[in-house]
Each structure stands twice: as structure tokens, then as C-alpha cells.
Image: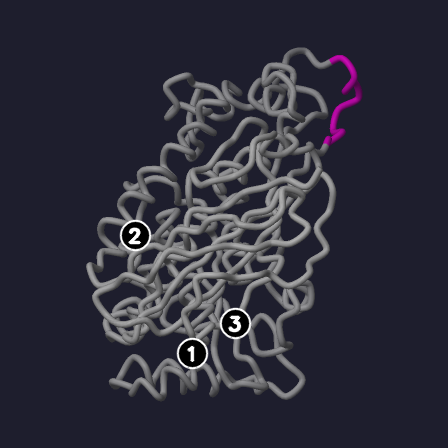
């Protein structure tokens, strides 16, 4: 769960990461596999997480440019994919490493050579899940876009996550070099604030955790699921007590209830705690504009989406306004703050079907440079049975964006 949910969060946030899938397999190595002598024998070998290998196929799957891709470790990188016009002697990587590690490149250089928006996404999820095992120069890949000439960072090996005590300082090469600059820090905080509002929160990440948990339990009682069979196969297997292995009885030992459901709950609790920490430490800025409030003013059938927005309020003067709408999947009974019509929030999520997450907009406006309290959305194809969230945010003259407003949530029936 830790790795699968982590990689999905990276992908949702806008930095391409490996896809994952759970598998189970059977190994026939004895003459009588059908009637094993105990639960530790037989052909059933439990549940495993398949992680997408990062190479040329990864780039194609994630619609990334076919450029030079390096697995970073030990102060250098191992070439895992060579683009059609890429060089093979690592001169491109060596030049990039030498420039940022031995000197003090200008802001112009950073904007020309590092894909900053992707980096902000990457750093935001690192902080959310505490993927700090990057401080030793490993567990990430560098990709050089042959068209733009910019490098991007992509995550790898995210098993030591979802707890503050996990290994590592978290100080990968760009944290201090990039985020120490006021202009970049402001841009990063804007994106982190947005990811907090739309993705890394108890509502959306909680639903994501449930989505992945249901894939393992099938939405049924835990004791009857394949994860229970996996635990019976391995948790007290004699081999686990031998040297070099994890020890017996370690499954879900961190959970007060000592079961899979308890570990799922611990992940959700960590989202809440880490969100509070992020807001308090990383996003502390008294100058951001006040979060606007919106009110629906359209017809009851939502045939025209019209809204009224509260007046702009901020330390600095108004610069821009933005609106968005997203199609969302909510667990049964989940509610969020904000005005909305009466009625069910949404249908329960279905096992095997991917959810819709608010971070992916159905439509988002450009930056509107004139403040107008009234706004009409363009005509959109809204579907019966779907649930939507509308939000707005404002920006001041210093470039600071407010939080997105509390959502107006409605269902088409």
C-alpha cells in the first residue's frame, strides 16, 4: 500500500512515476501441491506488488519525450534509456551536475535547465509522504527532454515512507539550491497549497487509499480476502525467523488492531498529521490573499453554472482570478465543507474502477486579470450520475495565490 499509493500520488500531482499492480502467483516445485502439509507449503506464494520499470517503455507509457533517462546514485547516473539524438557518454548529465553542484547558477539558468513545475509537484509529494530517502543522492531518475533541454526528476523506491521516523534527510540536490530562492519558493508554495487543497488531504487521499485497499480486499471482509491468505502464508513462516529476514509476526505490527484495516487507518491518520505539519511549516505565509467564498446563483437543474464570489481581500492588491470545475468520485456518505444542494454526495466507488480525483480539472479558466464577482461557466458536458466540484482562487500582485475556495459540490441526476 505504501508504495502503490505513493506512486499514484506522484502521478496525480503531475510528475510521472511508475504504475503499479498487485499480482499473486503459484510455484509448483513438489509432486503434491494440492494437499500441502501446512499453510506454509503448497504452490500459493502470496501477494506481490509489480512496479513499472523505468526505461524507454516507461517514457512511452507516460507520454514523456524519448530522451536520456538516468537512474541516479552515488553522485552520478546510470543511463537507462537513450533518446534518438541522445549522447551515450554522459556528457549531458555531467555538465548538468557540474553546473549546479560546483557553482551558483542564476535564476535564468535554473528556469532554462530544470523543469520547475514538475519539480514543485515532485517535492510536494515527497513532503506529503515523507519520502526522505533521497538525501543520499539516490531513489530518483533524471530525464533530459531533447526538445526543451530541461531536466526533470522522477521518483523511485518509495518503500521508506508514510512515517516521520523513516530514513533520510530529504535534502535532494534541488531542495536547498532551488527552494532557497524567494521566487522559486513562492512558486513552490503556490503549487503545494494547490496540491493540499485538491489532492493531499484527508478527503481525496483518503479516497485514494480506500481505492487501493479495495483492490486487495475486493470490498469484502478482510478475513476472506487474498491479503489474509498472504498473511497466513508468510507472517509466521519459519523462514521469516532465519537470519536476514524480517522476523515472525511482523505483518501490520505498527497498527493498534494488528490487521490490514488498522494499517489503512494509520495511513489516513498520517495524511491528517502531515497535512497539518505542511500547513504550519511549509506554507506559513501571512501575506497570501484571503480564501474567497463562492455562492451558486444558477438554476436548480444546473443547466447554467453561475456563481457569485466574495470581494477580494489581501495585504497586497489584486492581480488575477481563476475558476475550475472537476468531476469527483466520493465514497458513500463523504461530505466536504461548502454550500451545495441537498441530495446524495455521490455513488459509492466501485471495486476495479479508477476514481476521479479533483486535482484533474474538467475545465479551468485562464488567469482573469479583472476582478468580477459574477461568473458564468462555459457550456460543459455534465453527465447524469456524476458529482462535480467548483472552486475559485485569487492572486495578488506579488504572485501569491490564495487557497482554492471551499468547493461548491453538486450531483447531476
Mark seen at residue 36? none
Residue 231, quarter of the rendered image? top right
Q: Is residue 39 left or right of residue 284?
A: right
Structural crowding at the residue carrying mark 3, measured as other residues with C-alpha within 10 Å and reported as few (<14), some (14–19) or many (≥20): few
Residue situated in front as seen by the camera: 222 or 296: 296
**Residue at disc 1, secondary structure:** loop
Query: Marks 2 and 1: CB-CB under 8 Å?
Result: no
Residue situated in front as seen by the camera: 298 or 385: 298
Lower sequence index among marks 3 and 1: 1
Lower sequence index among marks 2 and 1: 1
Label 3 vs label 1: CA separation?
Answer: 24 Å
Residue situated in front as seen by the camera: 234 or 298: 298
Q: Please, is residue 394 above or below residue 302 in the view?
A: below
Residue at image mark 3: 366
The nearer-to-camera label among 2 and 1 is 1
Label 2 vs label 3: CA separation?
Answer: 39 Å
Residue at image mark 1: 114
Identify the residue shown where x is 61% and y is 30%.
214
Q: Position of residue 31 (x, y in %)?
A: 80, 21
Q: Position of residue 131 (x, y in %)?
A: 38, 51
Label 2 vs label 1: CA separation?
Answer: 24 Å
Residue at image mark 2: 168
Q: Position of residue 34 (x, y in %)?
A: 79, 17
Highlighted range, magenta: 26-35
Lower sequence index among marks 2 and 3: 2
Q: Please, is residue 83 above or below residue 196 in the view?
A: below
Amino acid at each position: 500500500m505504501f508504495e502503490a499509493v505513493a506512486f499514484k500520488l506522484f502521478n496525480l500531482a503531475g510528475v510521472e512515476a511508475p504504475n503499479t499492480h498487485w499480482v499473486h502467483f503459484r510455484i509448483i516445485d513438489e509432486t503434491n501441491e494440492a494437499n500441502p502439509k501446512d499453510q506454509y507449503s503448497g504452490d500459493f506464494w502470496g501477494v506481490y506488488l509489480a512496479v513499472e520499470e523505468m526505461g524507454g517503455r516507461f517514457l512511452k507509457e507516460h507520454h514523456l519525450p524519448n530522451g536520456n533517462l538516468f537512474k541516479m546514485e552515488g553522485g552520478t547516473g546510470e543511463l537507462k534509456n537513450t533518446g534518438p539524438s541522445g549522447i551515450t557518454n554522459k556528457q549531458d548529465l555531467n555538465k548538468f551536475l557540474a553546473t549546479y553542484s560546483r557553482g551558483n547558477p542564476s535564476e535564468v539558468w535554473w528556469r532554462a535547465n530544470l523543469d520547475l513545475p514538475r519539480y514543485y509537484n515532485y517535492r510536494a509529494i515527497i513532503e506529503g509522504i515523507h519520502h526522505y530517502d533521497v538525501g543520499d543522492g539516490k531513489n530518483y531518475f533524471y530525464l533530459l527532454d531533447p526538445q526543451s533541454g530541461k531536466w526533470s526528476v522522477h521518483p523511485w523506491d518509495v518503500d521508506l515512507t508514510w512515517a516521520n521516523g523513516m530514513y533520510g534527510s530529504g535534502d535532494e540536490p534541488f531542495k536547498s539550491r532551488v527552494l532557497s530562492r524567494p521566487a522559486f519558493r513562492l512558486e513552490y508554495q503556490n503549487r503545494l497549497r494547490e496540491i493540499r487543497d485538491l489532492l493531499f488531504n484527508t478527503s481525496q487521499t483518503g479516497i485514494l487509499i480506500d481505492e487501493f485497499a479495495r483492490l486487495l480486499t475486493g470490498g469484502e471482509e478482510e478475513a476472506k480476502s487474498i491479503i489474509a491468505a498472504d498473511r497466513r502464508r508468510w507472517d509466521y513462516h519459519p523462514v521469516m525467523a532465519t537470519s536476514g529476514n524480517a522476523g515472525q509476526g511482523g505483518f501490520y505490527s505498527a497498527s493498534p488492531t494488528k490487521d490490514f484495516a488498522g494499517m489503512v487507518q494509520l495511513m489516513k491518520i498520517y495524511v491528517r498529521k502531515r497535512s497539518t505539519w505542511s500547513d504550519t511549516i511549509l506554507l506559513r505565509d501571512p501575506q497570501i490573499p484571503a480564501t474567497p467564498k463562492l455562492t451558486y446563483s444558477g438554476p436548480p437543474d444546473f443547466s447554467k453554472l453561475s456563481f457569485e464570489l466574495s470581494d477580494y481581500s489581501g495585504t497586497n492588491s489584486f492581480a488575477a482570478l481563476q475558476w475550475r470545475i472537476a468531476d469527483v468520485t466520493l465514497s458513500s456518505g463523504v461530505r466536504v465543507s461548502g454550500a451545495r444542494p441537498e441530495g446524495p454526495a455521490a455513488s459509492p466507488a466501485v471495486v476495479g474502477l479508477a476514481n476521479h480525483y479533483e486535482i484533474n480539472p474538467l475545465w479551468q479558466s485562464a488567469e482573469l486579470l479583472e476582478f468580477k464577482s459574477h461568473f458564468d461557466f462555459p457550456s460543459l458536458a455534465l453527465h447524469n450520475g456524476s458529482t462535480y466540484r467548483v472552486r475559485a482562487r485569487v492572486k495578488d500582485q506579488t504572485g501569491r495565490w490564495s487557497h482554492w475556495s471551499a468547493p461548491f459540490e453538486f450531483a447531476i441526476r
